[in-house]
Image (cartoon, grey):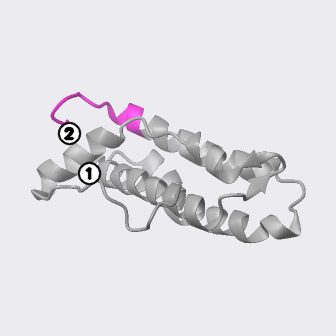
Amino acid sequence: MMTEEKNLCMDDLKMDLAKALASHVDILKNVDQIEPDQIDGLAFVMRSLGFMLEKTPCLLLRDNDEDVYYAMFQYYSLLEELKHNVKMSYPHARIHTKLLIDILEGFPKTYSSDMIKWWELKTGLVVEHTKQTILMD
């Protein structure tokens, strides 16, 4: 399946998904101690990432383009929402010296606009670039 602007290879999408899962695992590997005042923010992020990435291993093993495209559209959308929620609710949460929001910024979002276009073409719906939460600067 292709988007309007690019011919996306399924391997490219799966690589972004694999990188997202690896980034999640890296967070878990690098947490050797959690400060008590950081537990709520870190738990929120870990639960959210777990929900977002729970089907990743199966998707990486299958050759169902439609499932991968949908999963990537969902991942990119939820990643943006997670970042907005962390900025609003846990702006100072950190692991060691690194802010959680900075860690989340490192998660891949390579084909986000392509997946939005795919969704719009597939459903006929227009994805608004608004957020469900209010971003406070």
- Element type at mark 1: helix
Residue ranking furthest to the top: 6
Residue 83, image x and y in percent?
53, 55
The label number, if any, that marks residue 1 in the structure image: 2
Residue 65, image x and y in percent?
28, 46
The label number, if any, that marks residue 95 in the structure image: none
Badge 2 amino acid: Met
Where, quadrant-wise, is the N terminus in this rendering? Answer: top left
Q: Measure the C-alpha gap from mark 2 to mark 1.
A: 8 Å
Marks 2 & 1, CB-CB < 8 Å contact? yes
Badge 1 amino acid: Glu
**Few, some or many C-alpha atoms within 10 Å of disc 1 (few <14, some 14-19, many ≥20)?**
few
- Element type at mark 2: loop
- From which residue to which does the magenta span run? 1-13
Q: Main secondary structure of the magenta part?
A: loop
Q: Which residue is mark 1?
A: 66
Is the residue 29 above or below the residue 132 in the image? above
Is the residue 76 above or below the residue 14 in the image? below
Residue at 16% in and 51% down? 120
